[in-house]
Amino acid sequence: QVTLRESGPVLLKPTQTLTLTCTFSGVSLRTSGVCVSWIRQPPGKALEWLALIDWDDDKFYSTSLKTRLTISKDTSKNQVVLIMTNMDPVDTATYYCALSRPRLLPGWYFDYWGQGTLITVSS
Amino acid sequence: QSALTQPASVSGSPGQSITISCTGTSSDIGGHDYVSWYQQYPGKAPQLVIYDVSNRPSGVSNRFSGSKSGNTASLTISGLQAEDEADYYCSSYITTTTVFGGGTKLTVL
């Protein structure tokens, strides 16, 4: 059974840096083809993909946010970390981590999701 | 990369079929078959219901089906049930990135 859980601060002030941790079980990032993404959803709004890291340590970022994002992994701990700099109130959202299973075709889908964590940015 | 375009809302009565459209461009939906759909209940995480345009993950009801024509993908839910009331998001993989649609709220009357 694959499970994911996000953890991080609940409240941030503008300009601060967000550090989120995704801890997962039931699968290893050593397994070829496994990927973990971060996706966010502002209250009442749509999903937005942020970043992905794969088993081979390849990293991919949203074009619009890539200057503010850093994704990394700790395979031994089954954790993926997302750092987002210069937080603004518009970054208030529920942040999800999601895991993609290996597949033979290109691309990735989000097969398993964490419950999400609401991050509020306010002065 | 711009978000994919979905209708804000659709509705249907129990037993009916509904279709949700998702319009992109030749650079995303029209350029390949890596389109997926997610179902999201209020306060819950999304769940994958369709991938590669028309494939269903294990455990997803066969009342859910997907298709694509040109730059538009579609999700059809047949035999509508009260439990289908949720938000639905389409998504397209575009080499090294992913874009979502704006979401569609499905109301079962």
Image (tube, grey):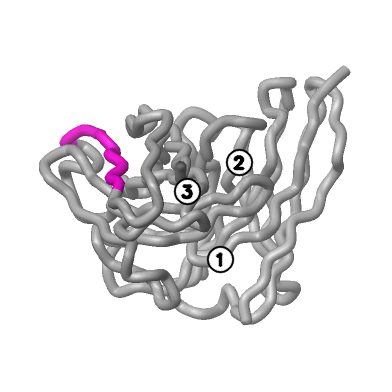
Residue B10 position in % (x across, y down)? 38, 36
Q: Distance from label 3 to label 1 (Cα)?
A: 19 Å
Give the foreground label among 2 and 3: 2
Residue A22 position in % (x across, y down)? 71, 59
Q: Between B85 and A36, which is closer to the camera in this rendering?
A: B85
Q: Distance from label 2 to label 3 (Cα)?
A: 15 Å
Residue B94 position in % (x across, y down)? 31, 45
- Chain of the residue on which disc 1 is drawn: A
**Marker disc for residue A112:** 1
Residue at point 60% right, 38% down?
A41
Residue position marked by numbered label 3 in the rendering: A60
Pointers 3 and 1 in contact (C-beta within 8 Å): no
Asked where in the image residue A118 lies, by quadrant, the reply is top right
Pointers 2 and 1 in contact (C-beta within 8 Å): no
Label 2 Cα crowd, 10 Å radius (few <14 / some 14-19 / many 20+): many
Relative to A15, say whether A71 is above or below: below
**Marker disc for residue A40:** 2
Relative to A70, say whether B65 is above or below: below
Relative to A26, say whether A20 is above or below: above
Name which residue type carries label 3.
Answer: Phe
- Chain of the residue on which disc 3 is drawn: A
Element under label 1?
strand
Residue at point 65% right, 62% down?
A73
Name which residue type carries label 1.
Answer: Tyr
Residue at point 25% right, 40% down?
B28
Element under label 2?
strand
Magenta residue span:
B18-26
